[in-house]
Every structure is written in structure tokens, then in C-alpha cells.
Amino acid sequence: MKIQPPTEIRLQREAGEVQFHWPSGEVTCKRFEALRLACRCAHCTLARRSDQPVTDATQVSVVDIAPFGVSGVRFVFSDGHEQGVFPWRYLWELSAQASPNRMNDGRTTQLESGR
């Protein structure tokens, strides 16, 4: 089953999470630190395989969200990390495990259709 991209992604700064609005109408969320720890870039993957800490994510926040073609997004984290690509299916799987529906703090990132 192909996962369609979210129709909207909201950066919930006060709540410390990113909110995803899916075409099905479902809204899911994922905490900033959980997204940082879930990064699958080469650096983070190597750290995990070497039993090294990826980062101290307790104080990390998402400062920006950048579309990555039609396949997903890249999160820019406050620790300067921005290498990981988060495909739509991976984001769906990660965020479906989180608490849904928090209040919007007014900072919304809209993605164009197909992104």
C-alpha cells in the first residue's frame, strides 16, 4: 500500500512536536526528540550500529521542514543536523505510534501537492 503525502505538516513549537495531516483525515504527531533519534542518515545509522548515542535529543527541536522531492521531507534540527530523509511511509509509521491531535501554535508548514 502506497502512503500518500500529508496534506499539511504543522510545526508545534510549544508542544514540542510535528503534526501530520494525512489525506485520509487522520492527524498524527511525533515529538521532536523522537524524530531526531529516528533519523536514518548514514551518520546516525553508523552510530546506532556501533552502539554509540546518536545525540542527546532531549534539548533538540525542529527548526524547519524541507520537502525532499515527492518522497518525503528533511527536518532541520536545532543541533544543526539536517541530513536525514524521512519518507512518507516511515513518517506514517513513526507518527501513528504517537499521541494525536494537539493544539496548533500558529506555525504551519504547508507542502505543495505531491510533496
Image (cartoon, rainbow, N blue to C red):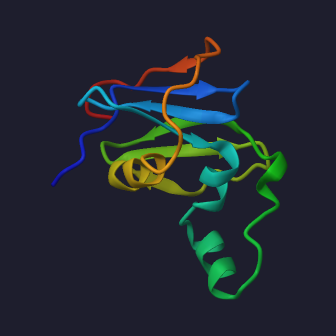
* Residue 84 percent across, percent down from the top left: 55, 57
Quadrant for the N terminus, please.
bottom left
* Residue 95 position (above or below residue 1): above
Left or right, 76 with reference to 28 = right
* Residue 63 percent across, percent down from the top left: 69, 34
- At a point 82% along the width and 60% down the height, the residue shown is 56
Q: Nearer the viewer, residue 27 or 56?
A: 27
Name, please, the residue furthest toward the bottom: 50
Q: Quadrant of residue 51?
A: bottom right
Left or right, 89 with reference to 13 = left
Q: Quadrant of residue 43?
A: bottom right
Left or right, 48 with reference to 114 = right
Q: Quadrant of residue 83?
A: bottom right
Left or right, 23 with reference to 51 = left
Number of marks in the rendered image:
0
- At a point 76% along the width and 81% down the height, the residue shown is 52
